[in-house]
Image: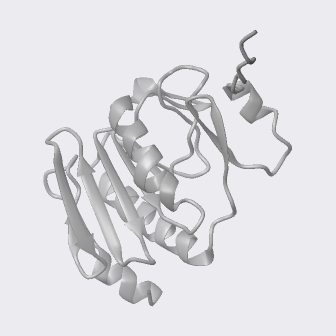
Amino acid sequence: MAPASVQKSLYTIDDIYALPDGSRAELIDGQIYYMAPPSRTHQDIVGELFGTIREYINSNNGLCRPYIAPFAVFLNEDDKNYVEPDISVICKPDKLTDKGCFGAPDWIIEIVSAGSRRMDYFTKLFKYRTAGVREYWIVDPEKNRVLVYDFESENTGDYTFSDSVKAGIYEDFSIDFAAISSLLNI
């Protein structure tokens, strides 16, 4: 008799919503990934980036909407993928409901922390690309690095915290990481 194979459990969004209050997790291809609370530096960077993006959009009467985690993104419009990117920018209002974003955001930014390094650089990079995200930034304060993946033009940029980084989804918008890093002393 052949040995019994072990079947891996696949989880759904219902399992994410059934987690105890205060638990944070993401679901990628039916696998649950728990998230540790972010550091103060992580939150400072997220706050500055979000404020800069929101100010640009508002001052230009833009149609896109920025959201800060925790904000539900149902990437593949199925029940096996649920993420909470640090920052999501959605330019198609029909993707938005009170529950979150159904489908790929146009622009996602993740701030790397010790516990999220592999997830941000590999798992999410692949998932965001295949889901149809237009642009993905990985901001890594420990490495003083900003990786920019413009999936539409298939360009990749590698920057430091002393650079000004252009957003690919906008013609005239850049984020000055030198100013942010000076403000936050990082």
Q: Percent position (x, y) of residue 34?
A: 69, 49
The vertical placement of 147 against 185, above or below, is above
What residue is shown at x 82% (from left), y 33% (from top)?
18
What residue is shown at x 20% (from left), y 50% (from top)?
168
Q: Percent position (x, y) of residue 56?
A: 30, 58
Q: Nearer the viewer, residue 119 or 5?
A: 5
**Image quadrant of residue 55?**
bottom left
Q: Nearer the viewer, residue 154 or 86?
A: 154
Q: Quadrant of the N terminus?
A: top right
The vertical placement of 63 against 163, above or below, is above
Left or right: residue 37 versus residue 177 is right
Left or right: residue 100 versus residue 51 is right
Q: Quadrant of the C terminus?
A: bottom left
The vertical placement of 11 against 120, above or below, is above
Q: Is residue 49 visible?
A: yes
**Image quadrant of residue 12?**
top right
What residue is shown at x 24% (from left), y 71% (from top)?
159
The vertical placement of 166 against 1, above or below, is below
Q: Nearer the viewer, residue 24 or 100?
A: 24
Which residue is farthest right?
A: 20
Which residue is farthest top?
A: 1
Identify the colour scheme used: one colour
Left or right: residue 166 versus residue 122 is left
What residue is shown at x 60% (from left), y 63% (from top)?
115
Q: Is residue 86 visible?
A: no
